[in-house]
Amino acid sequence: MNTTAMSPLTVTPLGFIPDLKNATLVPFNETACENWKEIHHLVFHVANICFAVGLVIPTTLNLHMIFLRGLLTIGCALFIIWATLYRCALDIMIWNSVFLVVNLLHFIYLLYKRRPIKIEKELSSLYRRMFEPLHVPPELFQRLTGQFCNIQTLKTGQAYAAEDKTSVDDRLSILLKGKMKVSYRGHFLHNIYPCAFIDSPEFRSTQMNRGEKFQVTIIADDNCKFLCWSRERLTYFLESEPFLCEIFKYLIGKDITNKLYSLNDPTLNDKASKKLDRQPSLCSQLSVMQMRNSIASTSDSEDGLQMFLRGTSSASSLRNNQQEFYNAYGVSRLQHDVFC
């Protein structure tokens, strides 16, 4: 037996250092890919074009995310077709199937968010006049009016609220159709027209005081229809929607200011009421600035309000109504919420 025979397993010594000087280097003028493979099928290139177009869509485009997800979905579908029919590559098909499902779900969700919101016919006028100018989205308005409120009706002569009997804690309402008349101890104060709050002064003046009663009587002067919220549930909802909460503060403050204006002209008709309602902010008008100045410069806020009202109308004809309005709505409690 030849003891010098080499073992088929060659053992490299631990201290062995390869000879780098004699190593053969690949010249720079040669490439590692000597034989390029054939060009892939047209489906492969169309898929990549979809990816490229989707990625270069500018973000300033209104629907750019929908276009992006749609093109990514189409591209993944084409990759699946290419990998299945022309490459027979299981791993490529599986990965693109996962990407297809993810992008398709995103695409469907984005389309769902962009769906047209249908607002009930009875509420469409309310939305256009009060909430749309303040950029309230239709879906938010639908949430506001679709969960914890209902539409109620009153026939001519029926009472919405009675003095010292009806609680102010139960509801907040907006008149949709008809006309209501507000009186205090039998004396007429003002009218309420469509797209105006019915009980906004009570809502603002009694937010910190529970268990109080209406100090005015509100009676339907025509067949009326109004939108009614549960006050407790509305307050809870507005706490979770800060933007809508600020909108309500503005609308209620504006509505109370309109009611103060109507004292100067108790015969204010619906056309004039709509003209006032289109004002961006009644608190920015000169007469309201005079009211603020009167309140600020007078120690007694009620005297300041009377000074303002005497300066803008005939005191002899309005003094009784003004005093009744103060007594009925508690202007001393409202002045901070409405005018400050």
Image (tube, helix red, strand yellow):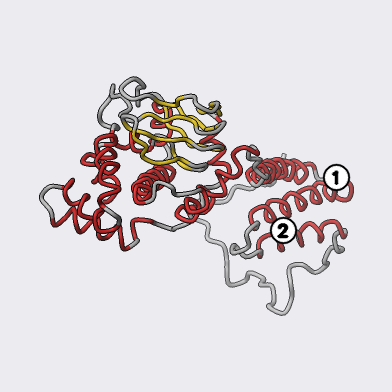
The N terminus lies in quadrant: top right
Among the 4 quarters of the image, the one containing residue 120: top right
Query: Mark 1 highlights which residue?
Result: 84
> Counting other residues with Cα less than 10 Å from the Cα at mark 1, is it few (<14), some (14-19), or many (20 or more)?
some
Quick check: 151 left or right of 202? right
Q: Residue at x 77, y 67 (%)?
A: 33
Query: Mark 2 highlights which residue?
Result: 51
Up the image or down, 125 lies above or below 61; here it is above
| SS under mark 1 | helix
Q: Looking at the picture, which amino acid does disc 1 mark? A: Thr
From the image, state whether disc 2 or disc 1 is nearer to you.
2
Quick check: 274 left or right of 56? left
| SS under mark 2 | helix
Horizontal and vertical percent position of residue 335: 24, 45
Q: Residue at x 36, y 39 (%)?
A: 189
Horizontal and vertical percent position of residue 259: 37, 45
Horizontal and vertical percent position of residue 108: 69, 42
